[in-house]
Amino acid sequence: MITHRSYAVDPWSVRETELSLDVLAQSESVFALSNGHVGWRGNLDEGEPHGLPGSYLNGVYELHPLPYAEAGYGYPESGQTVINVTNGKVLRLLVDDEPFDLRYGRLLSHERVLDLRRGVLERTCEWCSPAGTRVKVRSTRMISLTQRSIGAVAYEVEPVGCHVRIVVQSELVANEQLPESGGDPRAALALQSPLEPEENFASGHRLRLVHRTRRSGLRVAVAADHVVTGPQHITTASESHPDLARLTVASVLRSGQVLRVEKLVAHGWSGTRSLPAMSDQVDAALAAAALDGWEGLAQEQRACLDDFWARADVEVDGDEEIQQAVRFGLFHVLQAGARAEERAIPAKGLTGSGYDGHAFWDTEMFVLPVLTYTAPEAVAEALRWRQNTLPAARERAAQLGLRGAAFPWRTIDGREGSAYWPAGTAAFHVDADIAHALVRYVAATGDEEFARDTGLEVLVETARLWRSLGHHDHRGTFHIDGVTGPDEYSAIADDNVYTNLMARGNLLAAAEAVERYPEEAKRFGADDEESASWRDAAEAMNIPYNPELKVHEQSEGFTRYQRWDFARTRADQYPLLLHFPYFDLYRKQVVKQADLVLALYTCGHEFDEEQIARNFAYYEALTVRDSSLSACIQAVIAAQTGHLRLAYDYTAEAALMDLEDLEHNTRDGLHIASLAGTWLALVAGFGGARRSGTVLEFSPRLPERFSRLAFRLLFRGRRLAVEITQEQASYTLLSGAPMTVRHHGEEAELKPGAPVSRPVPSPPHLPPLEQPLHRRPQADRGRKR
């Protein structure tokens, strides 16, 4: 999409220079605004034309039945789907009785800019109506990062060279008609008219609608207030209906006069609060926002983002598109989690309805690592959401005949939402992913209160899951059989290496937590005897290895499977899941996404450098990257093993996943994990950043295309800046107590304001690695130079 003629490359914005209806749906995802609680897709202000209307509240969903051809014990009975809630961003315009519709008349100019520093979407256009009347329209839209429930729009109309009768209709609209799903299993199930009206209100400039979902029983309230300025003679009228509330503003404008409507929109939802309470809540939120007004909200937004970029910015010299993309990715990752506040971070954030709005393990393993080192307060909230869903996870484990907690593969409210158990229920690694995120957060922040009040309980319950799921054989070796690892083309396997290594870490972390907090552990019935059994299982964990090939097996026996016939697989048959049965995929050596290669990153201490290089080369030839989660991890390990050009190509693929719509489904929402993966590829890949206990380690090397890479991190109350060139790396402690870092294994002591520089070793000269036919990364295809 970024190579489309309508899009320009800029380091601090995404700019659309003309309106192109062929990429309208993708633009709506790219230009989406959110704060983790409220999300607005980047639809045009007037509501039409659109690709996919979208206004979302995190945690608001509707239930739908999950039909099965054959019933089975333990199958989830219902699914959850995010719904399009009441749309508060609509401002319709009539120009001398003609609707302002960009499909008619003549569109003389149209530009939209997503400003990554100010956190706003700006739009300017000039339009000539079919009758020959010309007007300029300017709008600025934001979702507040500081006032959780508030969205705002400033909308201006100005005639050009004539007197014009102008009418602006500011609306709240519920139960908008949605387009039909295209049949892609990754796309959301569109639920038509999920909201039942409970209250509609209009008085003066104030509007309010309250609805309740039909099946899930969630109450949604949205209210709006307005400030109208312009010529002396302006009329206003308000009205409300069950699914519509409207303020109509009318005036006659002379050339050069401007009619401005500032609209504040408050959102709220609850599964328990009464209708009057919800009405009062959104009215109160509007009152709070009105204290600052539009300008105050804009200033707060800029200040919030100034602080974020000061601790999180990444600079890339030598590739303007990756520079733009990494900031675009960081901005959307922040938007996805900033104010989620004990709610999930969905795979699409709040940018679209793809994947039904579900959260997966993506959150803990791709998104939370970025936020841990840039916005750690959001990580604590995301992990508290997991703790809050423990009752459902315990119930699920009991249903499966297991102890502890079995966290869901995909969910909105904490209950399992996957109807396909081999890729859902069997993917138990999600438990270890959550534990891994807990350990990472505590190590990076030193938050002992969180470790005791949240981390301990989750670690105990996930450790119990592993101990009951696995077993010791007659030799004492511990096995975890019949599970699905990250690779969804290899289901129901024994001793998946990623799962087993992550479970080992989970078991040891739980045992250490019980030892550290013995009194608190008693509340969960955990004691030294139980934690000793966790240690025994961890130490005896089976890690499959093929001594003939000298590689670790993705799972027991994987390397004896028949290899997938890549030579007979056409380029148009990817992704494979849409063209071949899972039965065939499951019994072949073909890898959808980084699995064992992901273990090389997350559990790198379990392998030596030679093993990492051999493993990476072996699985590189089998991995088809039919998942957006793969390229960034392959970039990290390619950089670690010295394949810098390959790492660069994978980095570009992850970075441009949505800006170039590489998987042809950006219309359904952004790939938040892949956007986060851009940061991983740059910081963990070319920066070589790793954590060993409470020490940061770096092994930087840059590809030829980069002349400089710089990034900033938060770590245990300190702000650290890292700057890497082809020749050297410099480490500067910007604030906080002195700290020690390691550079290619050598310790360096850092004090505030005193940079320490070390030489960067030359990269090795390595032969290129083999990829499956048609699946070599094509990141350079069509890119600007």
Image: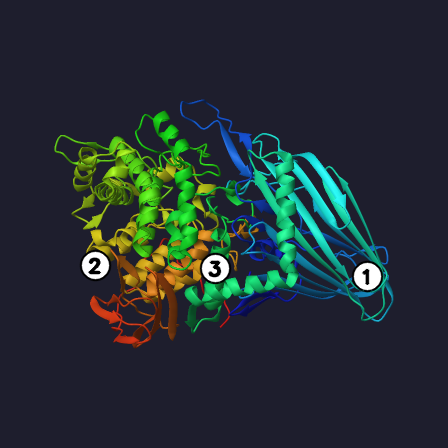
Question: Which residue is under mark 1?
Answer: 129
Q: Earlier in the sequence, mark 3 or mark 1?
A: 1
- The percent coordinates of residue 248 (x first, y second) are 80, 51
Asked if residue 276 lies left or right of residue 520, the reply is right
User: Mark 1 falls on what kind of element?
Assistant: loop
- The percent coordinates of residue 556 (x first, y second) are 24, 39
Mark 2 is on which residue type?
A: Glu
User: Mark 2 falls on what kind of element?
Assistant: helix
Question: Which residue is under mark 2?
Answer: 609
Question: Which residue is under mark 3?
Answer: 329
Q: Earlier in the sequence, mark 1 or mark 2?
A: 1
Q: Nearer the viewer, mark 3 or mark 1?
A: 3
Mark 3 is on which residue type?
A: Gly
Determine the residue positioned at 76% across, 56% down: 101
Gap between marks 3 and 1, in whole Å?
38 Å
- The percent coordinates of residue 49 (x first, y second) are 70, 52
* Scheme of image coloration: rainbow
